[in-house]
Image (spheres, helix red, strand yellow):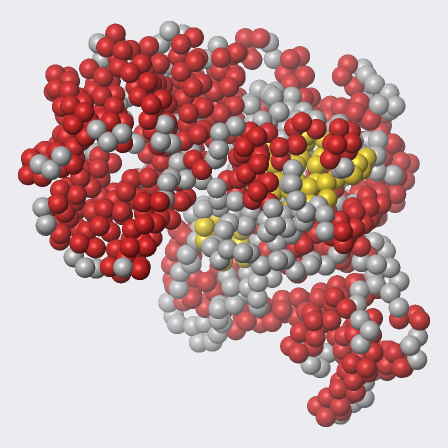
Amino acid sequence: MRFEVLGPLRVQLDRGQIPLGASREQRILAALLLDANRVVPVTRLVEAIWDEHPPTSSVKVVRNCVSMLRRQLATAGEIVTDSGGYSLRVPDDEIDLRVFVDRARQGRRLAAAGELTGAVVHLREALALWRGSAFTGVTGRLVEAAAAQLNDQRRSLQEERLSLELTLGGGAELVDEIADLVAEEPLRERAYGQLMLALYRAGRRTEALQTYHQVRRLLVRELGIEPGPELTELHRAILNADPRLAPVTALAAISRPEPSRPEASTTAKPVPAQLPASPYAFTGRTTELDELCGLLDAATRAGTSMVAVLSGIAGVGKTALAVHFARLVADRFPDGHLHVDLRGFHPTGPPLDPGEAVRGFLDAFGVPAQHLPEGLAAQSALLRTLLAGRRVLLLLDNARDSKHVRPLLPGGPGCLTLITSRSRLTGLVMAEGAHPITLDPLPPGDAHSMLIRRLSATRLAAEPAAVTTIMARSAGLPLALAIVASRLVNHPRFALRAIAAELDLAHGGLEGFTGMDAEADVRSVFSWSYRALSSPAARLFRLLSMHPGPDLGAVAAASLTGVPAPRVRPLLAELAHAHMVTEHTPGRYAMHDLLRAYAMERADIEEDRAERLAVTHRMFDHYLASAHLADLRLHPHRDPIRLPATVAGVTVAVIGDREAAWTWFTQEYPVLLDLLRRAGGDGYDVHAWQLGWAMTTFLDRCGRWHDQAIVQQLALEAARRVSDRDGEARAHRNISIALLRRGLHGEARDHLWHAVRLYRGLGDQVGQARTLLNLGTVAEHRGQPRIALRYAEQALRLFRAAGHRSGQANALNNAGWYHSQLGDHELALHHCQRALLLQQEAGDRYWQAHTWDSLGCVHHHLGQYPEATECYRQALSLWREAGERYYESMTLTHLGDTHLAVGERSAARGVWREALDIIVELGQDADRILEKIRTVTTG
């Protein structure tokens, strides 16, 4: 969630932009954002709406506007009534203006301390937040005055940044930017001086001198004054070619981007932008940054790719350096930025499989899941093919060994690959020519600077001995320093010497190591930070180690602890403030590997076996019950399963509608996969196969059929371990659907016959009938409509014997479809109309869509084209409501056939192109639809 005022006023959520109301609501929101987290008097809000002469009803109007805003911002911020006014409660880091001010302040502080390169980076980050003039489109005297001040601040900061870059040796690469600023405000002498110096450094001395004469004439004509002494002195220095004007140092650490080659294809492709946010309070590492910049520049000149391995002990800041450098040079790689946490040293589970990482990168480039070849080697080759000829930045974080990353490496020139690992990855250095960079702990000067950035120079200067102890005990590890600083920030009255003494006394038990081992010192820091937590937060910290990761939400944390979610959220906030967890996206919390390992050790010591088992049980219950509920929101008419009884203390996620279910599955999918994989070892096989069942609809509708096959195979194995034949049969059916979607008809049929035999053994007529319908679909795809019809008729008899009316409707529809394929359209119409009536009685909108599509085809073959078109439109509406892309593409194809039949070639081409987009997205064979489009385009 993010409030943006540095440009058009916008409120962004993960799922998109919140539409704002009329101008009055926008003016009030602007006024609240200008003073966010402070009470804004009603009189000021009246002034924001009416520049002068407000009506007598102005207060009531403000109240109504605030009510409207509250509804619009229900999930984005809280507007609180307080002391004769209103306050918008929102974290500072979710308002771009506050982030701009903070980054600008940090940049100026660094510049004052002589750290010019770091200052430039922060000022660039601050200015990059701007998307145009502040509050563009929002009118009113109050807001416009504030916007003018902000725009002035932006311009001043631009000039400050350019001055620093010129000090660092900038020249030619700055000319165009400064010239644009001069054109915008032609009476600012400072900008003209910067332009003159940049031109001179670019070897354009004559133009630099002409610029001076231009500004002199302008100042005399417009203001009646001569240029000031600084501009005059610069003019004299340029005339004399003063050597002091030459660059002092290269801008290695802030290299400018090179233009990217134009894409050969004009088809719009996704450009991945996966880099994490810039690390807060990044300090030092100038030697490593210079080395990285030099390596990158050399690779660019040579036309090769660059692979760098950043290694060192845990907590030394490998990821921070990698992300910082990646952000620094990201604009040199316009074709995409990829990032993956390989979890090479994850304490609770195996490293991320390289195949999953490869598939994630392919997905980021828009490669449909079903377009993937089988096997890691083929998928890795496809990734290298995609990267060929592109300038892409890859950040491979937390690698286990060389084998872990080899499948992810580009094969050709132009890319930058940054790898972090606790291992040196010597095999990668020897075989692939990777450049090793080993990170040592921060030297005392950089450690001190980091503490200054997080605390203040004044506070540190008051207790120099304590600062020395803290830095020594933290062993120069950025992670340890961040935890120390966090505690001191949260407790501004704490004396530094008290913290230093606590560190000195932290011996014995898990902390029983000397300062010779840096990791031991980190554990010492963890232990006292842990002891500073409230008892409930400390317990939550321990129990979080039992969650598989990579992250979790408050409701899942509530189930771990067995307490309601409202009581857990403050505890998560406490852990986040203490840097024991990280809220990496709103409401989602992750834990650093070392912290997780420490939490596991504390759990082993402080939680008995019975409690650990109870936590695991609640966790599996939570995810199964929540996944089951989410699945019912997506597909409410599925044949039900009976879940195990939920134990006390489990909180089920609130999933109110289809959109919420889709969001829940998208967020929790990695967690569900991990749970499926570990369920067998933990003795939760029933949960495992039922989790797989609950994930079926989501995976099928979003086209993740490769993953679906893997998930259902795990479900099948789990059901077999507990001899649950119903679970086995369902898993076989679900595997068959994934195989069928991928065109593997023979394998799909084999799994379906396994399911038929299991259902017969169980005496489950409905299960048999469902499976026979699936066998009919396989026969249809194999060009056997008569066999498919027989399967549908057998299914209909079984559904009738079981008294299953919605099943009868589905079988009637399938039978009608096959009759139509066999040419008996009148009988087909009769079957499908009966099916639709039964489905409408049951309220089964998903299967109504199937039947509307069948009816459209029947009417088409009967020459009843208007009726066919209307049926297809009914089906499309229901497919889109369900998020069912696969069948939407089929109905669009049928609708195009009807348009063509009545001579509407343009309309046919339009819907076929819509179908093509979906088919390509899902990785289906597009030859047939492309041939249709070619026919109407060239015929």
Residue at position x 78%, y 29% in the image: 426
In which quarter of the view is residue 527 placed?
top right
In which quarter of the view is residue 518 placed?
top right
Q: Position of residue 396 (x, y in %)?
A: 66, 36
Q: Is residue 219 visible?
A: no
Q: Quadrant of the C terminus?
A: bottom left
In the figure, is residue 540 to the left or right of 657? right
Q: Is 583 above or below relative to 95?
A: above
Q: Position of residue 62 (x, y in %)?
A: 42, 62
Q: Is residue 247 visible?
A: yes
In the figure, is residue 778 to the left or right of 678? left
Q: Is 888 above or below relative to 601?
A: below
Give whichever of 529, 325 is nearer the camera. Answer: 325
Q: Position of residue 2 (x, y in %)?
A: 53, 51
Residue at position x 57%, y 30% in the image: 377
Q: Is 934 above or below relative to 148?
A: above
Q: Position of residue 436 (x, y in %)?
A: 79, 36
Give whichever of 866, 835 is nearer the camera. Answer: 866
Residue at position x 24%, y 27% in the image: 779
In the figure, is residue 232 to the left or right of 489? right
Q: How many marks?
A: 0
Residue at position x 33%, y 23% in the image: 746
